[in-house]
Amino acid sequence: MDQVGKMSRQKGNAFERQVAAALAKAMGASPKQISRTPLSGGHPYGDKGDLTIDPSIGFPFTTVECKHNRSWTLQHVMPLRKQVTDWICQAEKAGGDGFLLVMRGNNTSIYAIAATSTLNRALGCVEVEEVATLSFCYQSVVRQKKVYTCLLFSDLMDLLAAARTKAKPARSRALQARGRVDSIRSEEHTSELQSQ
């Protein structure tokens, strides 16, 4: 095994663990609920993407692909370079339109790319355009032309955390309302039985 390849794999594995930890924190999940997929990048079956995500946490993306390439910079996105389009195609194959592509280079900030429509659904009322570093159109070989948004990963984590905390009360209110309806139905059923 050559030393450069081993170091590259270690760097990629460490980046996947870093992304998993940040996503778990933003989603209020345990590290076991979002973790690195065993042998990610080297498995033709099983979980798609670089991270395994417990469906019970309500994660808004179908798959997460992590790319740490020493020469990558934001300038690879505009104009769009083959390296990034290859990553988008790989992520689309794994997760359809709902993918999240997280990437960084050596000594660069971490960025995320996702379909703008997916981000809008994931973040609820937040206007993605307000926090986007840039947006671009791209048509892959297997998909129609789509608009994608690239933003700082740290901004996305803040937005996911905010969306999660706003969603929790709405979910609990919905469950409380459902509980009240079930209670009313139960009382109506009991009174019907007593009247018979």
Image (cartoon, helix red, strand yellow):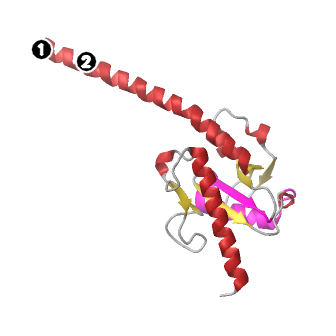
Looking at the image, residue 19 sits to the left or right of residue 190; the answer is: right
Q: Vertical placement of 120 versus 6: above or below?
A: above
Residue 58 % position (x, y): 52, 44
Q: Residue type at mark 2: give it.
A: Glu
Residue 7 included in the magenta stretch of the image:
no
> What residue appears at the point 81 percent right and 47 percent down from the top-left corner?
133
Q: Residues within 10 Å of mark 1 (few under 14, many from 20)?
A: few
Q: Vertical placement of 127 versus 119: above or below?
A: above
Q: Residue type at mark 1: give it.
A: Gln
Determine the residue located farthest toward the left in the rendered image.
196
Determine the residue located farthest toward the top in the rendered image.
195
Q: Residues within 10 Å of mark 2 (few under 14, many from 20)?
A: few
Q: Which residue position is annotated with label 2?
A: 187
Residue at mark 2 to residue at mark 1: CA–CA distance: 14 Å
Tell me which label, 2 or 1, sits earlier in the chain.
2
For the N terminus, the image quarter is bottom right
Q: Which residue position is annotated with label 1?
A: 196
Q: Vertical placement of 163 versus 133: above or below?
A: above
Which residues, given as a range, are shown in magenta?
78-106
Mark 2 vs mark 1, foreground winner is 2
Residue 138 % position (x, y): 77, 55
> What residue appears at the point 61 percent right and 45 percent down from the top-left corner?
26
Residue 168 % position (x, y): 52, 33
Looking at the image, residue 133 sits to the left or right of residue 171; the answer is: right
